[in-house]
Image (spheres, grey):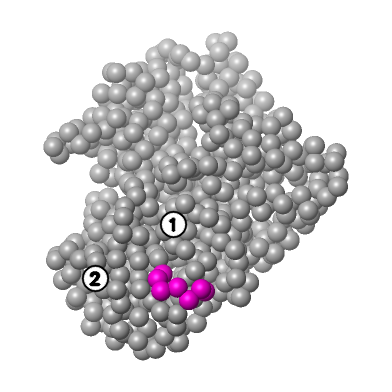
Amino acid sequence: MQKINRSLALAISVLLTATQCSMPKTENETKPALSNKQLNSTFAIDEYTYARPAEAVITHLDLDVEVNFASKIISGVASYHVVNKTGTNMIILDSKGLEIEKVTLGDGESTEFALVGYSQYMGRKLEITISQSTTRINIYYASRPEAVALQWLSPQQTADKKSPYLFTQSEPCLARTWIPTQDSPGIRFTYNAKVRVPKGLMAVMSASNPTEKSPDGNYTFEMKQPIPAYLMALAVGDIVFKSIGPRTGVYAEASIVDQAAYEFGELEEMLTTVEKLYGEYRWDRYDLIVLPPSFPFGGMENPRLTFVTPTIIAGDRSLVSVVAHELSHSWSGNLVTSATWNDFWINEGFTVYLERRIMEELYGKSYTEMLMVLGYQDLQATIEYMGHENEDTHLKLNLAGRDPDEALTDIAYEKGALFLQTIEEAVGREKWDEFLKGYFDKFAFQSMTSDRFVEYFNKELIGDDKELAAKVSVNKWVYGPGIPETRTINVSERFAIVDQAVASWENGASPSELGTEKWTTHEWLHFLRQLPSPLSEERLRLLDAEFDFSNSQNAEIIAAWFIHVISNNYKKSYGKLEEFLIKVGRRKFLSPLYKELAKTEQNKKVAIEIYKKARKNYHAISYTTIDGILGWEHRYLGMD
């Protein structure tokens, strides 16, 4: 049996009086919210969970916890309704770094449990003894300060610099570091939660949320739609809410909430657009929360409350495709979910495709063509880096015991979207839209494997049409490397004009002669990507003097500019580069910049000096990646 750390035992014991009085007195008070179809579905084999859902599975969570900023611990009780399908005497959950004090059954009787084994990416197996009649288990636990899913921020790391902040990031399989659970994308459950936080702070979750602060710091939540554990989310901070539309709004710190409300002012229109294309929005509300800069991703599609980075607030709504992407997850990913991380493209490829359909409806085809070309450029770069025959360029992956975070590449996103775009062109948009709408309806709140999708696609769209089958080549896309020759060709007339400007620049034109007055972010990105290399210090100075790239408030543009700054050793902008790397924690920007710095010994030394200051501001998801790029060792921080 696993024994709890003494210091954490005290943290949990304080809660027992508060939580036990609110615990259900019988095993029958909370019923599973899943349908019989969902309960009886076949579970895919997921190598990143210890759970055996075909034997005993969780269906509903009642969470009752306290958030302690002083100790950087979340502690309390996670109570699950369980369905014992086979009469087994054990249910297995996932746990990584959690301290388990005790486990009781629905009637309050203690039961045996054990934390068994250890795997780097899976943590430990939580084995709980149950009987054939058990329908409820109550797990009294505490997280640890180093829990990977939790980022605890000091006031200085926030926008307003007045109060501490906490946010979670549970994807891909990090929920188990702050809640004991069956942590697999193929296992769904509903949940209610009670969360206690310091007075003056607001708590929000991937659930129904408050719009005002609670005077006593106590909050209650309900998520009535079943979700997988990676969509469990919590944020706590000095935040306020501002409504955007009847079903939409934004949470942020007070100093940026107005900016955010303007930036995302088209949210309700986006929501209506997707509904017209692919059917009813099934999650009641759709709100956003703008997190501090250390958030490692552009956005995270936590149901009802998307978490987004402040780096998409550009002041001109030019980066809202990130929001369109996260909204699209309400259909692809959250509604129909990849069964395992090997099937991650089922989430992301569909979502990128839907995102671009939204942007086309709102901003026109020429705008979306730019997004497609930029995406294809990213895909080409990724495949060139990985190798054209690398199995990791397949849509269906074989992660084989590696970090599931390795699934989060442009292959899932851009190759997946290009595949779906190729299908659209082969079968026609009207027929393809009808297929997608039916797909989301038929498999709503269920998981999907690559194999199951291929089977369904062949049955519903290909049939006996051999010519169409050859035109699409579904097996080459899903099970083969690289980009199949059947791909659609993306071009952009607006980028052709940018290419002419680049050619003029190479032929000696001054920056003021390039005709950039009406360019959007996407044209600027294409321009920066197409600039020749190397560039002289004088040429870089002329560009920066005309366009003020080094002081850009647009994170996409300044990050693309800094690649040239580093590769050409343009020392004049290294101070701005350092400011950016210290402030921003989004891995999309950090990784390419640190990689570029690491290419020469001189710049790698610069990178290490910057990283000594910046690392503490990064989420573990980001700093783990940068550690690998720089060959980081603790001695750099004087920790040994």
Q: Which residue is mark 1?
A: 49
Taking the spot 25% from the left edge, 44% from the top edge, the residue there is 616
Residue 137 shows in this picture: yes
Q: Quadrant of residue 28?
A: bottom left
Q: Tag 2: residue type? A: Glu
Label 1, secondary structure: give it: loop
Distance of mark 2 from mark 1, alpha carbons? 22 Å
Q: Position of residue 265 (x, y in %)?
A: 54, 57
Q: Position of residue 498 (x, y in %)?
A: 62, 25
Taking the spot 53% from the left edge, 36% from the top edge, the residue there is 392
Please say if 74 is above or below 494.
below
Q: Quadrant of residue 617?
A: top left
Q: Residues within 10 Å of mark 1 (few under 14, many from 20)?
A: many
Membership of 559 in magenta stretch: no
Q: Which residue is mark 2?
A: 101
Q: Tag 1: residue type? A: Thr
Magenta stretch? 85-91
